[in-house]
Image (cartoon, rainbow, N blue to C red):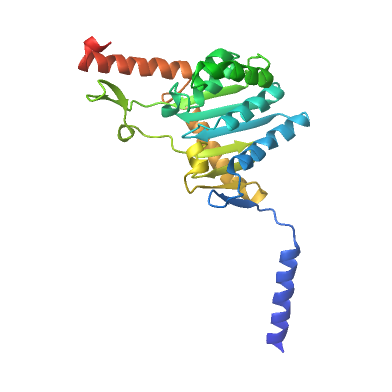
Amino acid sequence: MKTKLATILSVFSLALLLALPSSGRIRSYFTSVEKAGMDDILIEVMGKAEVRAKAGREATIDVLVFSFTTKSLADELLRIAATYPALVQVRVMLDITQMSQGQSHKGPYMYYASIGDYWKACDIACKDDECIPTCIDELQSIGHGVELKGFKVRYWFYDAWVWSSSKNMPNYHHSKGKLMHHKAVVVNRQILASGSYNWSVTAAKKNYENFQVFSGTREQGVVQDFLAEFEAIWNHPENSVTTQEGQARKSEIWDALYEENCPECQ
């Protein structure tokens, strides 16, 4: 009789527990799932900042990503910041590899777009001169030529350049640096999306990647841990640099390598 009563109570307790609303929420997404739409999900997560701003409240988007080459994600960040310039603060922290002015890297593109220098942004982003007018028109429609003072781009800087005898010029080398290899975004200091997924075309179309979205009250400890890591990197006194500071440091390193290895090459 006692065993039967205990079983009934256990079943009742389990049913009651399942009936209670859960305060925890973690969702996982994978590129191997065809309809996962990883970038769309990231845009949806970032959209929580826009929802907050529409209600007249201050909102934040803090991005911590190693490789950022997806233009649609860059444009979405710019659009949200430009739509609510007084309410939305966007901070993007990238590895120094993304400071390159090659077309694929979106760090310099976002920086110049955020200060209203659309020609410079598009000159970096476009593969040929023909796309520049269209690119400028797109940015004009997004930002209306206004400087976005709440949009900041910084880089994790380290000296990772070596002299390449085959190229006769400095060459970046991963083994020399300490990569800022995180892939995460924290929205409104309450929602976290993080995993292996870089914000890149390669991650979206070629690799097997994942990220998880943490949005429940039970997950706030994880969210705050990532936010603390972001703040520590963003505010690092030596390694966190602006676009201009990073480019200046890089030039100094390159000049020293040229002077040492091939002064006549300059």
Name the residue at the bottom extreme.
1
| Quadrant of the image containing the N terminus | bottom right
Say which residue appears at 21% left-offset and 17% top-offset: 261
Q: Nearer the viewer, residue 25 or 69?
A: 69
Residue 42 in the image: above or below residue 139 = below
Q: Which quadrant of the structure image shows residue 121? A: top right
Q: Nearer the viewer, residue 155 or 172?
A: 172
193 relative position to 101: left or right: right
From the top left corner, tell me how far across and down residue 186 is, in percent: 59, 37
- Residue 78 visible, this orientation: yes
From the top left corner, tell me how far across and down residue 54 is, in percent: 77, 30
- Residue 84 visible, this orientation: no
Name the residue at the right extreme.
55
Say which residue appears at 61% left-offset and 44% top-offset: 37
| Quadrant of the image containing the C terminus | top left
From the top left corner, tell me how far across and down residue 119 is, in percent: 56, 13
Q: Which quadrant of the structure image shows residue 89? A: top right
111 relative position to 6: left or right: left
Q: Nearer the viewer, residue 66 or 3?
A: 66
From the top left corner, tell me how far across and down residue 72 is, in percent: 59, 31
69 relative position to 16: left or right: left
